[in-house]
Each structure stands twice: as structure tokens, then as C-alpha cells.
Image (spheres, rainbow, N blue to C red):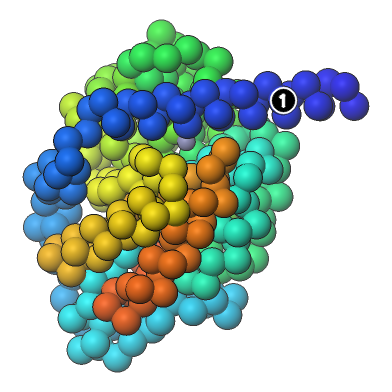
Amino acid sequence: MKKGKCMVARTKVYLYSAAVFISATLCAAVPPAFGAGLSQAAHHSAGQKATAAQLAEPAAPNGGRSSRVLPAEDSARRGRVAIIIDDFGNGMRGTEEMFALPVKFTVAVMPFLPTSQKDAARAHEQGLDVLVHLPMEPRQGKPEWLGPGAVLTRMSDAEVRKSVEAALDNVPFAIGINNHMGSRVTGDERVMGIILAVCKERGLFFVDSHTNYRSVAGKMAQEMGLPPVENHIFLDDVHTSGHVAKQMRLVREKALNQKYCVTIGHVGIQGKETAAGIRSGIAELKDSVEFVGISELVKDQCQWNPGVTLP
Ligand SMILES: [Zn+2]
């Protein structure tokens, strides 16, 4: 079908553009001490420490994938790592390699794309957490990089709500939302208020991908009684497997220092390289940290009991 091919070609172009843009933004805006720069924001939730007993709770059934459930003492002593992989939904490069990773991670799926539903269902079958990777307007860049169903600051309250609800309805098994791009929207209290309100109504949480240092998402989430969850480290701001493996060592440091770390990588043009870097990082880190889905981290660190009703 010509129309379908066109759609795929077009979406690949904007995902690529977005990847280049994000990469450029990170390179320009992120100082060498990336993790350190985010530590203050990370303290939003670091203040709410989980007890050893909570950490010892067994993980949810996960379809046989190892989440390395450990005895209470061991688990409490080790840092926990939640890897989120963004940009699923369009059959992007690295999709197979990511699904073959030997530990639990979280699958962030863009809505309304050719493999959105397939990727979400596959993740769920593998016992992995699913997030809606919601396209949100950036401060710079072209709207067409965002893809279908994007949330824009020029939308009315009703339009924002409709977009968020439609995206959630399009991606099955989602337990939360994280942002694709979104540096403008995450700084906008009106729009973030609506996104977070929809999350709250549906028993979901919002993970701030942290594309904007002036993001209001964490502060607002806390005010609304939602867990303030955010990305600490981008794994593939430079697209080589060596860099990703290096970032994984930063992840280990952060996880051991503050008990947990949320980190983001991407499928896409360099998705196979990112997957290779993550795989070698996992081999290196597996004895010192525990890899978990984002839902386990949020439940334990923020005492969050969402009661999400999955379809
Ligand atoms: Zn993205």
C-alpha cells in the first residue's frame, strides 16, 4: 500500500530528525557532569526511601525473564536500575536486539505508528512494563519531527486532554507516560497539569524524560500526589556502543549512591549499537545492581500503588 509505505518513510524521517535533534540538544546543553547536574531533581524521590522490607517484596510475575529477585538483605544493599528504551512503535532499528536483552527493562511505545500495538503487546507478553512515549512539543525543532498525536502548547485544554487520552487508548498495557522530545511542554504548567490529571484519573504515572532542565513535571506531579519520576542518564547521547557501555558505568555509580537510577536509551538509526552497549553494560553490572521495570522502582521508592487496570 503506497499510503502505508509513505507513512513509514515519513515517520522514519521524523524519528531520525528527532534523534539527531535530541542528540544535538544533549551535546549542546548537557555538561560533562550530567548525572551530577540532575542530582537535585533526583532528590525529589530519593527523600522517600524504601524500607528493606518493601525492597524485599517479590517482583510481579514476569514471564520468565530474570529480574533477579534477591533475598531482602542482598536486594537492599544493591542499587536498582530501570532502563527505559524509547521510540518503539515504528519497527525501528534495534527493536529485535532490545527485546532480546537478558534483563527486565521498560518499553516506551509511540502511539499511532505501524508497530505501536504489536510492540506493546510483545513487551507485555515478555513481562516488561509498557509506557506511552507521548510526542510533546520541544522548544526548538519542527512539529513534523514529533509524529502523530503530539501534544502542543497551542492546543486548548480540551484538545490536550483528547490527545493524551487517545494516545493512551492506542497503546495497550501502558502503566504510564514518558515524553518524546517535549522540552516546551514539560515547562508549561497548564499543559503538564492536564497530562498529569489524566495520569491520575487512570492510575498511571508520568516519567519525565528530562529534555528540559526547567521542567515543572516532577514538582507538579508531587503536588498532585503522583510519584515524581524522572530520567537521570541518557545512555546514547553519543551513538556508539562504547559510549553506551561507559554511560552504563555511570548508571551503576548513581544506582549504588542513591539506591536507584532511571536511564534512557533508544531504538532508531543507531539502535543496534545502543543495544550492544547496553548488553555489554548488563554483563558488567549484573553482580552489583538489580535491573527492574519502572513500575517496581516507582512502587518501592515512592510507595506508589496505582492499581492500574490493564485491558
Ligand atoms: Zn523519543
The image position of residue 217, as x and y in percent, is 26, 34
**Label 1 within 8 A of ligand 1 by Cβ:** no
Residue, disc 1: 9
Q: Which residue is drawn at 33% across and 87% down?
A: 70
Compared with 241, 17 (above or below) is: above
Element at label 1: helix
Q: Which amino acid type corresponds to the residue marked 1 in the rendered image? A: Ala
Q: Residue at x 23, y 27 (%)?
A: 29
Q: In which quarter of the image is residue 13?
A: top right
The image position of residue 299, as x and y in percent, is 31, 64
Q: Which residue is drawn at 26% across and 26% down?
A: 28
Q: Is residue 109 visible?
A: no
Between 167 and 90, the one lying in front of the other is: 90
In the visual, does 210 lie left or right of 131?
left
The crowding category of the residue bearing disc 1, from other C-alpha atoms within 10 Å (few below 14, some 14 to 19, many at least 20), is few
Between 164 and 120, the one lying in front of the other is: 120
